[in-house]
Amino acid sequence: MSRKVLVAYATKMGATAGIAEAIGAELRNHGHQVDVREVGQVSTIGWYDAVVLGSAVYAHRWRPEAVTFLRHHTKELGNRQVWLFHSGPVGPASDQTQLMPRKVQRLARRIGATPAMTFAGKLTTETAEGFLATRMARTELAGDFRDWELITAWAKDVAAAISSGDVSSWHRAETEGQEAAR
């Protein structure tokens, strides 16, 4: 079943935008109507059946505009299927999963979103912004570590779940049970 899907993202140096575009393309390949937008360009999510939200992660923090998006749309997101991802690990540790920041964990629980998927990032001297990133881009941390096969496989799973409509209700029921147990 074809659904309307928003793939929204917050990026600093462009790597997360590239991941969002790849996810959007894969969702389209599976028959969904997809808009890929930077979170600052999204004023409403009213006409979307599902939302995929991604953020670059720096120092274990999501971009502030992604957190603001979650806060601003909490009620609407609670009535939709929602998947989260973040990108950022680079260098030798690029394959390590990053935990969701606490603020994001709380908001994800409220809306019943699945835990965020971690994708490796990209850091190059051409795109590095700021003193620290520019210095890091001159070390073994530099390079494009994004795993396009992993990104595509995850997007295929999301596409199937959106078509079936089962994942969000399953995850939301699990989340509610966990909340009651606390």
Image (cartoon, grey):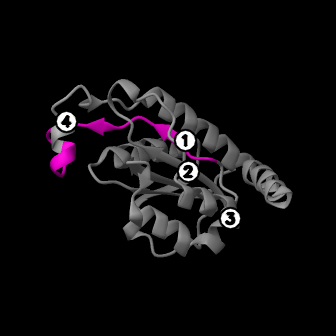
Callout 1 crowding tier (Cα within 10 Å): few <14, some 14–19, many ≥20 = some
Report how far apart the C-alphas of labels 1 and 2 lie in the structure. 6 Å
Task: Please provide the residue range marked out in magenta.
Answer: 115-133
Please identify the quarter of the rendering in which residue 121 is found.
top left
Residue corresponding to mark 4: 137
Q: Are marks 4 and 3 in contact (CB under 8 Å)?
A: no
Residue 151 % position (x, y):
48, 35
- Between marks 3 and 2 in the image, the one whose residue lies nearer the viewer: 3
Residue corresponding to mark 2: 84
Callout 3 crowding tier (Cα within 10 Å): few <14, some 14–19, many ≥20 = some
Looking at the image, is 125 positioned above or below residue 10? above
Report how far apart the C-alphas of labels 3 and 2 lie in the structure. 13 Å
Q: Amino acid at mark 4?
A: Ala
Q: Earlier along the polypeptide chain: callout 4 or callout 1?
A: 1
Residue 178 % position (x, y):
80, 54
Relative horizontal placement of residue 72, taking residue 162 as reference (left or right)? left
Q: Which mark is residue 117?
A: 1
Q: Are marks 3 and 2 in contact (CB under 8 Å)?
A: no
What residue is drawn where x is 37% and y is 47%?
A: 16
Quadrant containing the C terminus in the rendered view: bottom right
Callout 4 crowding tier (Cα within 10 Å): few <14, some 14–19, many ≥20 = many
Looking at the image, is 26 positioned above or below residue 170? above
Report how far apart the C-alphas of labels 3 and 1 lie in the structure. 18 Å
Residue corresponding to mark 3: 110
Label 3 SS: helix
Q: Are marks 4 and 1 in contact (CB under 8 Å)?
A: no
Label 4 SS: loop
Q: Are marks 2 and 4 in contact (CB under 8 Å)?
A: no
What residue is drawn where x is 61% and y is 71%?
A: 74
Q: Are marks 1 and 2 in contact (CB under 8 Å)?
A: yes
Looking at the image, is 129 positioned above or below residue 148? below
